[in-house]
Amino acid sequence: MIELVGGGLLGSIFGGLFRLAPEVLKFFDKKNERQHELSMFTLQTDLEKVRGQFRMEEKYVEHSTEQLKAIQEAFKEQAATAKEAGWFVAAISALVRPGITWALFGMYAVVKAAGLTIALQSGAPWQDVVLKGWGADDFAMLNMVLTFWFVGRAIEKYQAHDR
């Protein structure tokens, strides 16, 4: 009789566990499904951020290209006007860009030299003075001048070759 009661008890326990097992598995499956959906949402959000940044950069490039075209047209008009005015005006016009470039470079070099001198006189180590004396703005200015003189010339030569 004890065996029947024990067997019935064990049967009830195992029967209950086996009925409960699918519910436990469903719970873990739903948990994994929610975690997967959250991961997918995060990935989609990151993708949209990248797409937005790409669109912004694309618009920036378009704007920069339009500015370069406008500058190129202005230079063409200036050159045509100078040629019509005669050789003296053309010569002066040809010296304007390099003259302004050298004047700005000279002023920039004087300001930088003064800043470095003051920093060195204050007792700062020369390594720190040199490293901190050149920043993002300095690089941007150098990049702008080099782009103006060399990239602009390359584009002009390329376009002249295609004509």
Image (spheres, rainbow, N blue to C red):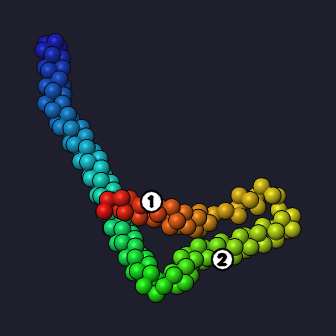
Residue type of the residue flagged with mark 1:
Ala
Quadrant of the frame with the C terminus: bottom left
The residue that appears at 46% across and 87% down in the rendered structure is 85
Q: Is residue 141 left or right of residue 31?
A: right
Taking 61 as reference, is 152 left or right?
right
Which residue is pictured at 54% across the width and 63% down the height?
146
The image quadrant that residue 98 belongs to is bottom right
| Quadrant of the image containing the N terminus | top left
Expressed as whole percent of the image width and height from the top left, the position of residue 123 reads 87, 64
Residue at 17 percent across and 23 percent down: it is 14
| Mark 2, residue position | 103
Nearer to the camera, 71 or 90: 90
* Residue depicted at 67% across the width and 62% down the height: 134
Residue holding disc 1? 154
As displayed, is residue 110 above or below residue 88?
A: above
Q: Amino acid at mark 2?
A: Ala
Question: Does residue 24 lie above or below 100 as drawn?
Answer: above
Real-space Cα separation, disc 2 to disc 1, in angstroms: 24 Å
Are circles 2 and 1 on residues that touch, CB within 8 Å? no
Residue 160 location in percent, x, y? Answer: 37, 63
Mark 2: secondary structure:
helix
- Local crowd at mark 1 within 10 Å, few (<14), some, or many (≥20)? few
Determine the image quadrant of residue 13.
top left
